[in-house]
Image (spheres, rainbow, N blue to C red):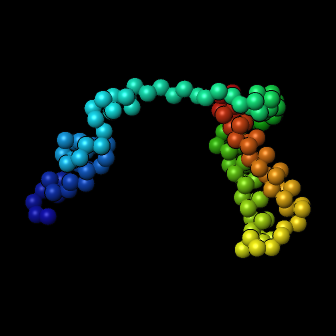
Amino acid sequence: MCGDPDKNDRTKHHTWFHEDPTDSPTHVLTASGVENIAQHKYKPGDYTHLDTLLNPVWTWLTELLPMWLAPNMVTTLGGLHCGLAYGVLWYLSPNLDTPVPSWAIFLSGYCNIAYYTFDCMDGKQARR
């Protein structure tokens, strides 16, 4: 490591987005593969029947949210429901070897529905 430190420091030349693919003994992507990735356009899938049925509800609920609320916070609120359900079930049956009360199963069902709802609302909040 004598001499110019920039000359000996090759870390900036070995990051994946700067590495010359011809230096690699095996080429992972061909030139046409790289071109296909560069030209890719995202095309969303079709709505499911449940999406079509619940979309007006999600739109209505999203309109109740304040405009200053970030979409990531909507996602986080949904994720907290998952964490709550997991925490309660783990507390009641840490080894998953004892039955849990019925209310815990209903709470888990509610939390799952709430998560799905918040997850569907975050994109609508982002596009408002």
The residue depicted at 54 percent of the width and 26 percent of the height is: 43
- Of residue 107 and residue 18, the one placed in the foreground of this image is 107
Report the side of 106 relative to 127 (left or right): right
Whether residue 68 is visible here, answered yes or no, is no
Q: Tell me if residue 79 comes above or below residue 68 in the rendering.
A: below
**How many marks do you count on the picture?**
0
- Of residue 101 and residue 56, the one placed in the foreground of this image is 101
The image shows residue 118 at horizontal and vertical percentages of 74, 42
- Of residue 19 and residue 48, the one placed in the foreground of this image is 48
The image shows residue 128 at horizontal and vertical percentages of 69, 27
Looking at this view, name the residue that lies furthest to the right: 102
Whether residue 119 is visible here, answered yes or no, is yes
- Of residue 76 and residue 119, the one placed in the foreground of this image is 119
Report the side of 122 relative to 9 (left or right): right
The residue depicted at 28 percent of the width and 35 percent of the height is: 30
Rendering quarter of residue 48: top right
Looking at this view, name the residue that lies furthest to the left: 3
The residue depicted at 80 percent of the width and 32 percent of the height is: 54
The image shows residue 46 at horizontal and vertical percentages of 65, 27
The residue depicted at 76 percent of the width and 41 percent of the height is: 117
Report the side of 44 relative to 6 (left or right): right
| Quadrant occupied by the N terminus | bottom left
The image shows residue 126 at horizontal and vertical percentages of 65, 32
